[in-house]
Amino acid sequence: MTTRTALFICVENACRSLMAEAIFNADPPPGWVAISAGTRPAREANPRTGPMLRELGLNLPPHPPQLLTAEMIDRARVRVTMGCLDDASCPARLKTMELRDWSLPDPATLNDEGFRQVRDRIQQLVRSFRAELVLSDGRQNGVAEVVAAGSAE
């Protein structure tokens, strides 16, 4: 089976997209992996991102904030922006492609409770996204009824 990639994108790749990558990869759908990148990456993850993930029993991804590349964009099966489409650093090409935008506030500007709220929203969105990918894969493989029945229990 070919591994398919979900790409999570934000400006700095220091908070939102790193959290989405970590949450997704903690329990990815079969055949899927997530990566994350930023349009203007920070030097390092926001100092609160790691501790906020550890509250969920997760760790930061093994890479520092990284630059979004054309190869990442092209290779990804699904592209998810965190609410950065209005930023001047967002590539015009990305805006013309099929993607999802979760329109999340940047938690770096929020207090700890606000940061947790964004993290928890990302966790909910990733959970729904994973379920959608599993159902989509099931339909493509002719087993949608089995997947749907299993998720209703």
Image (cartoon, grey):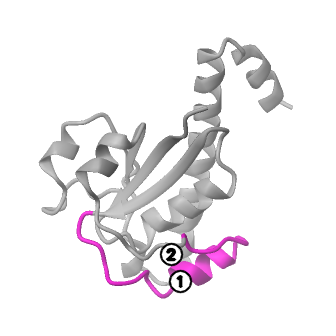
Q: Quadrant of residue 121?
A: bottom right
Which residue shows up at 69% across the image and 52% down it? 27
Q: Quadrant of the N terminus?
A: top right
Q: Mark 1: which secondary structure? A: helix
Q: Mark 2: which secondary structure? A: helix
- Furthest toward the right, the residue is 153
* Amino acid tagged 2: Phe
Query: Residue 100 lies in magenta, yes or no?
Result: no
Residue 119 percent location from the top left of the image: 55, 67
Which residue shows up at 52% across the image and 59% down it? 21
Residue holding disc 2: 115
Specify the label residue 133 is tagged with. none
Q: Quadrant of residue 113?
A: bottom right
The reply to whether callout 2 and callout 1 are in contact (CB within 8 Å) is yes
Q: Relative to 2, does residue 121 appear above or below in the rendering?
A: below
Residue holding disc 1: 112
Q: Main secondary structure of the magenta part?
A: loop
Residue 51 percent location from the top left of the image: 61, 83
Question: Magenta residues?
Answer: 39-61
Q: CA distance from mark 2 to mark 1?
A: 5 Å
Query: Residue 44 lies in magenta, yes or no?
Result: yes
- Furthest toward the top, the residue is 142
Q: Relative to 3, does residue 41 appear above or below in the rendering?
A: below
Query: Does residue 44 appear left or right of residue 92 in this picture?
Result: right
Query: Does residue 80 appear left or right of residue 152 in this picture?
Result: left
Residue 152 percent location from the top left of the image: 80, 29
- Furthest toward the front, the residue is 1
Which residue shows up at 55% across the image and 34% down it? 2
